[in-house]
Amino acid sequence: MVVHRLSLSQTTIFFARQQLKKVRLLLPSTHASKITVGNWRKKTIYAMHREGLELNEGWFNEASQNQAMRFGDLPEWAMELSDAICESVLLSDAMDLGSSGGDEETCAFPSDLLWRKPLFNQLIVNLYKPGEGICAHVDLLRFEDGIAIVSLESSCVMHFTRVERIDYDIVKEGQLDPLIEKVPVLLTPGSLVLLSGEARYLWKHEINRLPGFQMWEGQELNQMTRMSITLRKLCKT
Ligand SMILES: O=C(O)CCC(=O)C(=O)O
Ligand SMILES: [Fe+2]
């Protein structure tokens, strides 16, 4: 599994942050939906649809709002973010060219995904208070391969575990195969995680921000409010 962790430019991060602070997503009640993500604590999901979208001041004004979604055409700032992601991938691939010879395996995003149109048409923004995270999951199969997560504000450790772990645990109680260990990935503000292929389908990702789980190089990370922006593309049917 290769998890690509790139860094967006400071300007892009600043821009995304400012835009997120400014907008409020209003939705027609017909499009509102409530869902629960895994066994993560219950959240109200604001399902955004093209026609129902209005932008105003103060997104996440209310303490109870901690997640927003949008499907279809993305807002201008998210399109710019998506372009910035594309540029970061091209830049990182260009820098890797010498060492890897441009092997698809080592590309941050396989080219068929990078050049699809649109690159993304679904957006989810999550706001986490200190201690809050997201349980281990593989993103729903209604989304295509090729997922980007932009991590902002607080640093955190995202852990990856193989999907087969559950079966393995049942069969071989307690024995740990090096192949199915947890893989920690440090995300600093502005980190961009790109999931494709094996990393998207065969590994679960998780952020456990309960005390004792956010360890990096022997130190527990200082937790603050964290925001993430996940960009995906819905499958056609
Ligand atoms: O907050 C994150 O970094 C992860 C979000 C995520 O995995 C998801 O929305 O599926
Ligand atoms: Fe996810």
Image (cartoon, grey):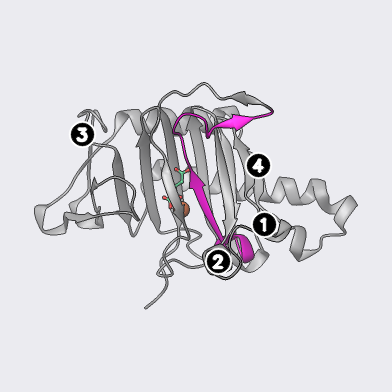
Looking at the rendered structure, which numbered label has been put on residue 6?
4
Q: From the top left corner, tell me how far across and down residue 103 is, in percent.
A: 81, 63
In the depicted structure, whether residue 37 falls above or below residue 221: below
Mark nearer the N terminus (4 vs 1): 4
Q: Position of residue 40 (x, y in %)?
A: 34, 48
Circle nearer the N terminus (3, 4): 4
Residue found at the very far left of the displayed protein: 29
The residue where tag 3 is placed is 64
Q: Earlier in the sequence, mark 1 or mark 2?
A: 1
21 lies left or right of 195:
left
Tag 2 residue: 201
Using the rendered image of the protein, determine whether residue 115 is visible from the camera's viewpoint.
no
Where in the figure is residue 158, as x and y percent of width and height? 55, 42
User: From what the image shows, is residue 172 above or below residue 195?
Assistant: below
Q: Which circle marks residue 176 in the picture?
A: 1
Earlier residue among tags 2 and 4: 4
Q: Earlier in the sequence, mark 3 or mark 2?
A: 3
C-alpha distance separating marks 1 and 2: 21 Å
In the rendered image, the quadrant that contains the C terminus is: bottom left
Which residue is pictured at 58% across the width and 27% down the height? 10
In this view of the protein, which residue sits in the foreground, 188 or 183? 183
